[in-house]
Image (cartoon, coloured by chain):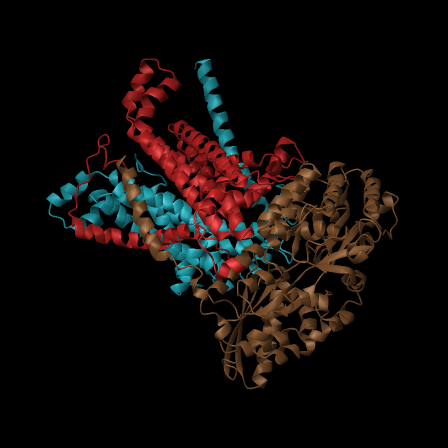
Chain colours: A brown, B red, C cyan
Amino acid sequence: MRSLSRLTTAGVLGAAALALLTGCLGSSDKGSSGGQDANRNADAKKVELTIGSNSVKGGKSSAGATFLSDVLIPKFVADQKGKGVDVTVKFQGDGSDDEVYKQKLSLDLSNKSGPDLFQIDGIWVGEFAQAGYIKPLTDTVGDAAKVNDWDGWKQIPESVQALGSYNGQRYGVPGGTDGRVLYFNKKLFQQAGLPADWQPKSWDDIISAGQALKKLPGVTPIQINAGTAMGEATTMQGVLPLLVGTGATVNTDGKWLGNTPQLRQVLDFYHQIYSTGLGDPVLQKEAKGRDKSFAEFAANKIGILGESDYFWRSVVEPKEGVAKMADRDTAVGWALIPAMKPGSGVKGQDFVSMSGGGATVINPNTKFPQQAWELLQFMNSADMVKASLDGAAKITQRSDVNSEVLASDPMLSFIADKVLPITQFRPGLAEYPKISAALQQATADVVAGKSTDAAASAYQKAVETAAGSKDKVTSN
Amino acid sequence: MTSASAPVRGRTPARDVAGLGVGRAFGFVAPAFLLIGAFLIFPALWTIYIGITNYRLTGVEAVSPSIVGLSNYTKALNDALFHNALWLTMVFVLGSAIIGQNVLGFTLAWIMRRTRPAVRRTVEAFVLLAWILPSTVVAYLWVAFFDRDGGTLNGLLGTQGTAWLIDYPMACLVVFNTWRGTAFSMMLYSSALQAVPPSQLESARMVGASGWQTLRDVVFPHIRGHVLTNTLLISLWTANDFSPFLLTKGGPNHESETVPVYIYNVALQGGELGYSSAISFLLLIANLLVSLVYLRLLRRRS
Amino acid sequence: MRPDFVVRRIGFYVLICAITLFFAVPMLWIASAPFDASPGLGVHWPDWTLENFRKTLEHPYAMHSMVNSLLICVTTAVAVTAFAALASYALSRVRIPGRDALLYGLLLLSSVVTGTAAMVPIFVMMFQLGLIDSRFGVALVMTGGLLPAAIFILKDFVDAVPKSYEESARVFGASTGQILRDVVLPVARPGLATIMVWAFVNSWGNFLVPFLLIRSIEKQPGAVLMQTLTDEGGSVNLQVLPVFSLLFSIPVVVLYLLVNSRYGFRFHGGIKS
């Protein structure tokens, strides 16, 4: 075994070399940007900026990418030219899975590189801030008054501003937001003898509608996303809207939700749907399960589906949708998500919803912080926000724009008028993704046939690990 | 491989027949080893270092990772999901590499020896095509093949609605990887079989040996080294193969989460780079152990 | 003809047909979906159209990504083949202590390290070297990862080249350079060609390295672009993806056919124990 001893020698040598590497990690952040002058290059006549975003022409969020590179950037360049500044703005699109985009962006930021402005999901703001990758806008721009006096803030509702905030400080300007409802297929409802203006008032109402739909051949009555394969879609479209319907939130006063009665109520509801043939358990395990649920809804095979307004705008949209429904306007109904029982929802609400969205933030290591802030304001001006819609209707961050563009779309006005006032946002804390994964796992366990109690106690363990200690988890 | 430590049949030890000289020999080796050193060994050592920290890409640990010693390793030893991943990797390697690719590759090489060239070329073309197509493309081929609605397999078997990738994820991966990698074994065995003297095969036939006896007593002793080398290479490649992720993402519910997929999920979904580095190192150790077993088998001359 | 011979003949061809079908059937999708007006994941006789091709050609980055892939992979394949050939020849013909353990160790490393685990180190190193967003940098990293296996395979191949050729050339007074160029290289050419195809194919499908290191979408290779062939919401775009898969496969198939017709794509007695 001569080669073994040689490998051992090599191993020892390797361990020695390892000592040299100590300090290669995390060491780069000692020169924190706190010491940098926020007014660096403020008077530069030649400016270069890069906007990063997880969107790409011809792919994910293609419209967003097209707007940024073909409308916003030329307009901003022209605007700056008028002020005698020669700006070059580059668009750095990506278009991959969100998790992968996040890691790639983090690698850039941890090396003090990366785009000058970039778009991130609202729930990443906390962990990026903790890692020092982003700073409060007032720090980066250097002048609190300059940031706070921006007239755009007045148009962005407080709750939506939370998307770009962490610990009560603004880190970025939020983009548009969304809201979740229960969609239902009116054609199937008619066949099952259910009303076209269906509005369930409790979870039991959902179940009884499901039982009526179950009599139709080849129809899956209810699709509430579950399982790990759907990722965050399970948490946002399923667990969290149900959870707020029990009066609990995933993080209350700094404590994460553990194995509580409310969690078990949510899991029981899942159990009720997936063990009695009201839902399709196999679909929840498929890697492309969510896409498939869209296709099935469009093919009149799903009765009730919990989704965000994205489903209406981009999935069953008759012309460009992923799963087009030519008769969307007449065939698709929507209803508020009921609390478990009337009044049992968070803040005593009868109806509940969850919302998400992204924010655009400034890289603290940008060479041109002042110009980046100017671009950020420009980007979120009423004109640009309206232009970004390119004629389509979508819920934007700005109330003034919303009231103008949503009028023609009953569904989106419904979201803006009825859903946003009662909605909740996820906490932008670093532990959130792991808690979310644990929630997904708990639903996966229930759908796979585990008992609610077993799934809930496994969840409790996962949350304790994720939160770091028992004290940071509620349970009883 | 072994020629330095043990003289292998019919092979003379290395001789500098072209008059290269040690100096030029180092010059020849240098560019390759520089690249390997920079892009393989250096990152590898660094990975080992990350493995003893609690480094993450975001959050507090991104700014100030601290050395946590071996706690990532003790965590791995008690991690049910890691055990699950190790077990699945073993099933995957055994089923698709050691058995699947080996047996199918040898069978192809054996039965193709005296087939008409046209037949041989056609069959080989398909087998090789499966090997050279880009993995991203291949993943879609198989997702379509196994699809629950309208997938080719359900069409062929008349089993509409069977979600193969969900009901039988590991079996699907084994079949997939056998399909994907058989070409290498086939080519290697084809060339190995040319080394079996035809006269010996002829005499085996004369004494009335059965096909199986011929394989065992005449063919196998000649290609023993090839079998082991082939098995080693394809086992290593399979154990570290990432393509299961493209088919099942490790699901449903971790049922097909082999170690490379687990590492990816820990690193990207969970962001725990320290822990994922530690698991990678454990995977490396496992690979090393397997290789040592092969080396021993290779040494033992029967 | 004896009946059992006939039976065996039939059995033999049934076996061959079964194996061929096993390899061919999964590929049907890529032959039908690109031409289908309503492409899905299932295979069915297409409702013929070339509309999908038009859409793919109109994609802002699709064709350009092929050029990037070619740039990266040709560089990688040539570098791997050249460096592995030099190294394996020297390792085969000149005694270097610890050679075998070294080769094994590197082979092991290369199979593990190129994955997710080394993501951070490779990124940080390339960042320090200023090779982020560089196609050349991507090729370098891939070359480093593929070299050990290439040397491993090629060395066995060179070991099998009879030394008597070189010896006799030397007897006739040929210089080292002449021997390498006129004696060793021609004999080794099929093996080199095989390794080159192998390196090309491996780098062609590699997603992680270019994804990690490339920033401008104009420099992305096809393997990365393929992950972005989705619609607005991130679901797979079934109009563009099958066509792109088909087009993306053509270079590797052409390369294989070229090498196969010139040298015969096989290991020619290479890879021995």
Q: What is the x, y in percent for residue A12? A: 31, 46
Question: Please, is residue A191 above or below residue A410 in the view?
Answer: above
Task: Report the number of discs.
Answer: 0
Q: What is the x, y in percent for residue A37? A: 50, 78
Q: Is residue B204 left or right of residue B133?
A: left
**Residue at (38, 64) in percent of width and height:** C129
Q: Quadrant of residue B239?
A: top left
In-front residue for pair A320/C110: C110
Instruction: Let me know if residue B74 appears in the view.
Output: yes
Q: What is the x, y in percent for residue C233? A: 65, 56
Q: What is the x, y in percent for residue A292? A: 68, 46
Instruction: Let me know if residue C131 appears in the view.
Output: no
In-front residue for pair A429/B276: A429
Q: Is residue B268 left or right of residue A203?
A: left
In-front residue for pair A425/A473: A473
Q: Where does the C terminus of chain A fall, quadrant-wise?
A: top right
**Residue at (28, 48) in percent of width and height:** C85
Question: Please, is residue C247 above or below residue A450 in the view?
Answer: below
Q: Where does the N terminus of chain A fall, quadrant-wise?
A: top left
Q: Is residue A383 left or right of residue A337?
A: left
